[in-house]
Amino acid sequence: MDFEKILWAVLVLVVLGLVLGLLIAVVSKVFKVEEDTRVEEVLALLPGANCGGCGFPGCSGMADAIVNNGANPRNCKPIKQEKVDEINSLMTKFNEDQQNQ
Ligand code: SF4
């Protein structure tokens, strides 16, 4: 009798786990947020201090502003000139790619 209850409990938990797992998989597909890979590339070149010295809430905000609003990477206080040059080259490449599409 007790063994039967345990089996039912295990069965219910397994079915519940499978249903919820499937639900999570479907929801993650439906509500997937597409990341802009250009922002990630620019973010990788910023110092990553998240100090807010640029006027944005962090480096990701600054990267987004550089890519989408043409913010100047020089507004980042601790950035080195070589990284500014790399970001400017990257932005030139992005703009050329956009014009070729
Ligand atoms: S000033 Fe530079 S290091 Fe600081 S949050 Fe802005 S982008 Fe990041």
Image (cartoon, rainbow, N blue to C red):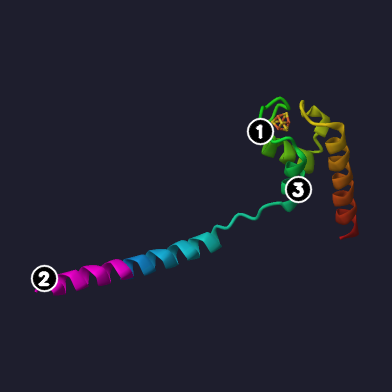
Comes first in the chain, label 1 or label 2: 2
Task: Name the residue at 66% across, 27% down.
Answer: 51
Indicate if the residue with disc 2 has its beta carbon within 8 Å of ligand 1.
no
Q: Does 13 appear in magenta?
A: yes
Residue 71 lies, in percent from the top left, at: 80, 34
Q: Which element is circle 3 on? A: helix
At label 2, counting other C-alpha atoms closer than 10 Å, the crowd grade (few under 14, some 14-19, many 20 or more) is: few
Indicate if the residue with disc 3 has its beta carbon within 8 Å of ligand 1.
no
- Which residue matches tag 1? 58
Comes first in the chain, label 2 or label 3: 2
Q: Which mark is residue 41?
A: 3
Distance in Å between CA atoms under marks 1 and 3: 15 Å
Q: Which residues are magenta?
A: 1-14
Q: Which element is circle 1 on? A: loop
Amino acid type, residue under disc 1 in the picture: Gly
Amino acid type, residue under disc 3 in the picture: Glu
- Residue 72 appears in view: no
Indicate if the residue with disc 1 has its beta carbon within 8 Å of ligand 1.
yes
Is 46 drawn above or below residue 2 in the view shown?
above
The quarter of the rendering in which ligand 1 is drawn is top right
- Which residue matches tag 2? 2
Name the side, left or right, on which 48 lies relative to 71.
left
Distance in Å between CA atoms under marks 1 and 2: 57 Å
Amino acid type, residue under disc 2 in the picture: Asp
Name the side, left or right, on which 14 lies relative to 73.
left
